């Protein structure tokens, strides 16, 4: 079915398809690096060209499983400060899906290559690149659009060198989810060892990271998961990661949720990635003057708050969006924080489930990421 | 009807009723100043006694029009630093009603005398009082429970001397509503001349104060009122106070409320005292990164917020409660701010509707304050 779609799109747009060997000469604005020299312009003898690249492209917004196709994009000449990176791995994050759907507030202009983070190995360099050598492992940091392709060419300033001992699936995914967890834990309240946090959606990757990052700092975590078959196993797994308490939503249908807390202080900080009732439960656990940070809305339900929660309980409700943080002054800390998170990975203090999938199975991985094949671990494309 | 009730309560509790001249000898914990010396204890010859006082008392929580009664409380001996104040005026605020109903989180122990702010004239002094003289006008600052009585005895530290030229209805009401308006305008965002705020419940006293305090600082105000008969007159009145724009809720049933704003910047700060749809309208007007402060919930409906308002629009939702602010470090500014607000009143820059009602008509004023007699101005008891 995918191939029928791809052939139809090829006819429409003139892009070469994975199964085709013809090179594309149709210029698209997105592939700046590959099209900024016209095919017939005069080129210095010494020009360094990237290899042709296979990319997951979408020409318009819509359901990712119908608008994306794998195409070959032609070689481009590297500018003086460009670095050409052979990608090793890149994840399919929910925000990647939202960007393709066109429902994300900031998104690349179409046509665009999917993906926003990943890891690769330096393949070739522009003549003025300093401090990066072929063979180095690098990640785009801050993350940057277009990582779902075999070769990515971006300015040297985009790339952050990392340790080659890092497992590629962690190097590929360290920014979007673990950095979100770390920043939310640090930026909204001044927590000290012995304090507590509460979160819903605790099985998400951000949720798992929050549990582990909190434990690492001596912060207790109260975790809310949805009711599901096998919730006992899920609880056990989260407790192994360091969760202090794990409750299903139905367990919290009690008059006073705080009465459940034994030897854990009332949390000053809560995280919500679900909305609806699960958000109300986070609010119920929070202590006087506490803050709830919303970073997702998996239930697609809004957050409902009583007047007295604001006036008498003095709660603050905030939001967190990594992409906005990346445009703030604080973003200069990004690489230091990434290095810290990768060091935790290497020490075995930060772990989460992923499935590495060959690039050739991209559309199966996408189906899994879309939830079409039931609950699945995070899909990470291996190029 | 009221007198039947009062007689019945008299029989139950043994307190003397307004119509009765018998003095009460039943000791109640609330009337600390009046009961801390037993009637038969030995008293120094020079002891200064307060006059007997008529007070609005409630013995238990419940509907204010059934649980309150006017009683005479006996003279007490003034301690060295006590000041006895003959009350001139005190308002009936919604929070006074909530305290009597027992739904307010912080409330005096019953039995208690109603009221929380007011103005009075110094009647007599304990022997060690400094800086206050008989005849001075004073207000309890921070405000303090039990102002609904003809003589109030409190420590000298409670009383703040004010100008005798102040109209008593403003002196009596300057703290709870105008100070709330001033603090909310100052403490949640750094606004400068030309900036804008948005609020619902704009006809409330806090709302009217916000309009005038904002105008005084060159801050534009966008005001939302409920749909009602005569809304054009209400709009005209608020515009006379300095409102830049006034909309009824139904006027804002449009796709993009911000398109209505001409020559007014998107507001960074919003105030909500209604909840429900009126709160959602405030959120819609707010600019990226804006803050909504909730200080009331007149519709008794909760506040509903989309996930994207937090993540992508970066809104913050907070609450304000004057009684909590009064316990904070910032409360040491209270009297300076009160003096500033009273100076605005004297300059004609701060005005709001009130009705002065003789103490003998207390239960009619209470009925009006409870909304039993339709829309009424703020009721202020004149002693």
Image (spheres, coloured by chain):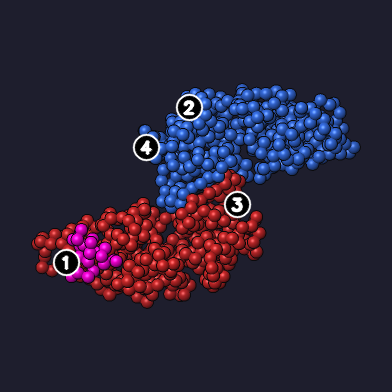
Chain colours: A red, B blue
Number of callouts: 4
User: Which image quarter is the N terminus of chain A in?
Assistant: bottom left
Q: Which residue is mark 2?
A: B235
Dot 3: element: loop
Residue A288 badge = 3
**Residue B136, quarter of the rendered image:** top right
Q: Which residue is mark 1?
A: A23
Q: CA distance from mark 3 to mark 4?
A: 38 Å
Residue A375 vs residue A280, the one in the foreground: A375
Q: Are marks 3 and 4 in contact (CB under 8 Å)?
A: no
Position above or below: B298 against A7 = above
Q: Is disc 4 on the same chain as disc 3?
A: no
| Residue at x-position 40% and y-position 65% | A372
Q: Is disc 2 on the same chain as disc 4?
A: yes
**Residue at mark 1: chain:** A
Viewer-side label of 1, 2: 1
Q: CA distance from mark 2 to mark 3?
A: 38 Å
Position above or below: B178 against A314 = above
Question: Which residues, given as a range, are shown in magenta?
Answer: A1-23
**Residue at mark 2: chain:** B
Q: CA distance from mark 4 to mark 1?
A: 48 Å
**Residue at mark 3: chain:** A
């Amino acid at each position: 079915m995918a191939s029928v779609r791809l052939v139809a799109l090829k006819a429409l747009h003139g892009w070469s398809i994975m199964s085709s060997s013809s090179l594309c000469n149709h210029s698209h604005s997105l592939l700046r690096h590959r099209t900024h020299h016209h095919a017939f312009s005069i080129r210095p003898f010494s020009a360094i060209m990237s290899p042709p690249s296979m990319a997951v492209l979408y020409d318009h917004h819509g359901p990712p499983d119908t608008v994306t196709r794998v195409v070959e994009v032609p070689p481009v000449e590297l500018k003086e400060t460009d670095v050409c990176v052979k990608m090793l791995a890149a994840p399919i994050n929910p925000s990647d899906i939202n960007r393709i759907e066109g429902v994300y507030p900031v998104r690349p202009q179409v046509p665009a290559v999917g993906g926003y983070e990943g890891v690769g190995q330096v393949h070739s360099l522009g003549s003025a690149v300093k401090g990066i050598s072929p063979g180095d492992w690098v990640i785009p940091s801050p993350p940057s659009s277009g990582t779902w392709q075999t070769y990515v060419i971006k300015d040297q300033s985009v790339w952050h060198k990392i340790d080659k001992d890092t497992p590629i699936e962690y190097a590929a995914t360290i920014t979007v989810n673990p950095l979100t967890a770390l920043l939310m834990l640090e930026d909204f309240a001044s927590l000290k060892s012995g304090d507590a946090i509460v979160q819903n959606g605790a099985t998400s990757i951000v949720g798992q990271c929050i549990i582990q990052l909190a434990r690492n700092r001596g912060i207790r975590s109260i975790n809310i998961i949805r009711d599901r078959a096998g919730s006992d196993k899920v609880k056990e797994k989260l407790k192994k990661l360091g969760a202090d308490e794990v409750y299903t939503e139905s367990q919290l249908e009690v008059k006073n949720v705080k009465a459940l807390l034994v030897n854990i202080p009332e949390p000053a900080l809560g995280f919500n990635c679900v909305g609806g009732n699960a958000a109300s439960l986070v609010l119920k656990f929070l202590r006087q003057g506490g803050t709830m940070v919303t970073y997702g809305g998996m239930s697609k339900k809004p957050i409902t708050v009583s007047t007295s929660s604001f006036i008498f309980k003095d709660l603050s409700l905030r939001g967190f969006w990594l992409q906005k943080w990346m445009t703030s002054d604080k973003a200069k800390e990004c690489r230091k924080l990434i290095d810290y998170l990768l060091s935790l990975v290497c020490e075995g203090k930060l772990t989460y489930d992923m499935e590495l999938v060959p690039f050739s199975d991209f559309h199966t991985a996408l189906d899994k990421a879309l939830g079409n094949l039931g609950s699945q671990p995070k899909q990470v494309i291996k190029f």
